[in-house]
Amino acid sequence: MPPHALGSGTISFGLVSIPVKLYTATSAGNVSFNLLHAKCGSRIKQQTFCPVCNETVERSGLVKGYEFTKDQYVRVADDELKALEGEASKMIDILEFVPLAQVDPVYFEKAYYLGADKGGEKPYRLLADAMAQAEQVAVAKFVMRGKESLVLIRPAQEGLLLHTMFFADEVRSFADVDKGQSANVREGELDLALQLIRGLARDEFKPEQYTDEYRKRVLDMLERKVEGREVTAAPAPAERPHVIDLMEALKASLAKKGLPAEAATAKKPPSKAAQGAAPKVAAKAVPKRASGGRK
């Protein structure tokens, strides 16, 4: 069964127009729960309640309000917000091309597959191949659901992917976060850390080898509950020891992986024989949040 398109649009590439369809690229695998009344087991209903009038308020009696100071609100009507929405357009206007390495993944929000729409097969293929050969990604603007979005289009898997992005003022500053600059890292410690990285390095990232073990345990537990079997809590994992000596911890990490530590104090990187068959370059990946409600 072919995937269901969320919508359609047109990539504006100079004087070339490329009709495309958007498809959801990701789907959170979180296990959903409903809230029940512990007394009778019935599913509860959430209501909006006014503490001043001491009454439940129906949805028709609600209006939006913006808190401009403590407990002071200005009312905003839906039609006022509607008037401020971006012009109804399906154009995805490419503004510039940049190397993907220059875009920090912290700006990425959601991912969508772009497929060629009717009549757009050739220009779609042309843009995908040209961007892949040039090793460039496109920065564009696109109005989605009335909201102007900054997006990035990149070639991948012989096609095009679209990422909605946060604007710069939506990304919090990292400047005031303690990054350990005051710590003194010894040369031997750095050599051991580099050796450990090389020992764990792989030529490519294979996401299929990683699974959500917590979700699997939750689903297994739920299945046993449904079947009426006794649920036994798993023993708590042993606490990891607090790192006192960084050098010893790095050596222990190497030993745990079966990697030699003799070459750690050498000025040059360890030889291939010391590293075994481990590849030399580690692929970068953006970790996926294990759980969260944001969509």
Image (cartoon, helix red, strand yellow):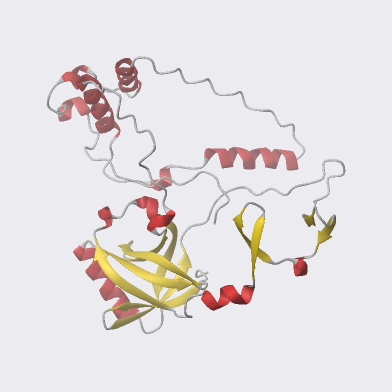
Q: Position of residue 272 (x, y in %)?
A: 16, 30
Q: What is the number of callouts on the image?
A: 0
**Up-down relation of residue 115 to residue 176 (above or below):** below
Compared with 128, 180 (above or below) is above
Q: Residue furthest left?
A: 268
Instruction: Kindly tell me whether residue 232 is visible in this rendering.
Output: yes
Question: Can residue 5 be seen by looking at this rendering?
Answer: no
Query: In the drawing, does residue 89 fall left or right of residue 13?
Result: right
Of residues 173 and 209, the one drawn nearer to the viewer in this rendering:
173
**Residue placed most toward the observer, 139 or 216:** 139
Q: Residue at x 33, y 29 (%)?
A: 180
Q: Quadrant of the C terminus?
A: bottom right
Q: Pinpoint residue 193: horizontal percent, then vertical percent.
A: 27, 26
Residue at position x 83%, y 57% from top? Answer: 53
- Report which quarter residue 14 is drawn in: bottom left
Q: Is residue 216 above or below residue 183?
A: below
Counting from the top left corner in percent of width and height, residue 278 is at 25, 34
The quadrant where residue 135 appears: bottom left
Spot the residue most to the right: 40
Asked whether, in this view, residue 229 is left or right of residue 5, the answer is right
Position of residue 63 measured from the top left corner of the image (x, y, whole percent): 70, 67
Q: In the image, 4: left or right of 77? A: left
23 up-or-down from 178: above or below? below
Residue at left offset 59%, top offset 24%: 236
Instruction: Give the residue displayed 52% in from the left and 56% down from the top.
Output: 27
